[in-house]
């Protein structure tokens, strides 16, 4: 059973929090509060709810949307986004912030576990002298643009760097890069097109030439899903001794 002293302390802490939110709205002349504690309580309650749960087609709350919701529902006649932000700051709330996470309670399927285990083994186990593990990815649609006039450096008297706003487009390029997970070496090519041929060319460049008498090497490449899919298409050229492994998606399905 809870003692009255602990209950009283909890009520005191809650009252202090509401009082801090109430005091944060002291912006009118004479130091009179603009909003009663009930408004701050309703605002904090709504900020701790997802917009979809209350019928708002929003991904996250903003100060402007919370202010509009309080006005539309008759909680207060007028309130500014700045006042909403001050009240939320007093409660250390930022409902517009997003932190991505992967819930440990969501079950993962067997394929997900098998892929993760396989990649973990590739990255951590000791390799044979003839083995290599590469991490491969692509950066598409790179658009280099050159200025029509050279950029001028900063000078004294607070003269900043001067950058010409006119530029010339050079088209789009695609970057293919491979990272050797053991040596740290990076290999890359820049090409106009994005096909299986360019992907395989990057693999060839990242594979050192071996003497004819040396043991046949085998390499594993962890790639993005799009690269792996293209490399498996029918009729694609093949590179022997390579095994492409695509990482799993973090989301189910």
Image (tube, rainbow, N blue to C red):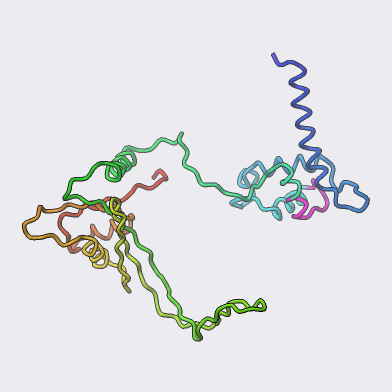
Q: Residue lying at the far bottom in this picture: please name it.
A: 149
Left or right, 54 with respect to 138, comes to right
Q: Is residue 80 magenta?
A: yes
Location of residue 62 in the rendering, given as x and y in whole percent from the top left corner: 67, 53
- Going 6% across and 57% down the picture, which residue do you hit? 213
Q: Which residues are magenta?
A: 74-85
Judged from this view, the residue extending furthest toward the left is 213
**Magenta span contains residue 153:** no
The residue under the point 42% across, 45% down is 251
Q: Position of residue 139 (x, y in %)?
A: 38, 64
Residue 216 picture location, percent across and down: 11, 53
| Quadrant holding the C terminus | top left
Name the spot of residue 225 as percent of width and height, x first: 33, 54
As drawn, is 240 to the left or to the right of 84?
Answer: left
The answer to whether residue 240 is left or right of residue 221 is left
| Horizontal relation, residue 218 to residue 170: left or right | left
Identify the image quadrant of the N terminus: top right
**Residue at left offset 45%, top offset 35%:** 104
Q: Nearer the viewer, residue 7 or 120?
A: 120
Front one among 184 and 244: 184
């Amino acid at each position: 059973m809870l003692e009255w002293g602990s209950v009283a302390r909890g009520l005191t802490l809650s009252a202090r929090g509401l009082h801090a939110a109430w005091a944060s709205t002291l912006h009118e002349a004479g130091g009179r509060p603009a909003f009663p504690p009930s408004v701050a309580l309703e605002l904090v309650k709504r900020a701790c709810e997802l917009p979809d749960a209350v019928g708002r087609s929003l991904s996250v709350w903003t100060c402007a949307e919370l202010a509009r919701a309080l006005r539309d529902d008759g909680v207060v006649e007028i309130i500014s986004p700045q006042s909403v932000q001050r009240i939320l700051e007093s409660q250390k709330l930022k409902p517009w912030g997003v932190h991505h996470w992967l819930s440990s309670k969501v079950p993962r399927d067997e394929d997900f576990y098998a892929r993760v285990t396989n990649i973990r083994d590739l990255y951590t186990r000791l390799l044979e002298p003839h083995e290599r593990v590469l991490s491969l990815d692509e950066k598409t649609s790179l658009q280099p643009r050159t200025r029509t006039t050279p950029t001028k450096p900063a000078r004294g008297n607070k003269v900043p760097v001067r950058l010409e706003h006119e530029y010339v487009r050079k088209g789009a390029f695609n970057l293919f890069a491979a990272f050797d997970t053991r040596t740290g070496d990076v290999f890359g090519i820049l090409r106009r097109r994005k096909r299986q041929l360019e992907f395989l060319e990057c693999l060839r460049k990242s594979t050192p030439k071996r003497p004819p008498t040396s043991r046949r090497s085998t390499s594993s490449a962890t790639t993005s899903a799009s690269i792996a899919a293209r490399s498996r298409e029918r009729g694609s050229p093949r590179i022997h001794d390579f095994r492409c492994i695509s990482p799993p998606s973090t989301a189910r399905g």
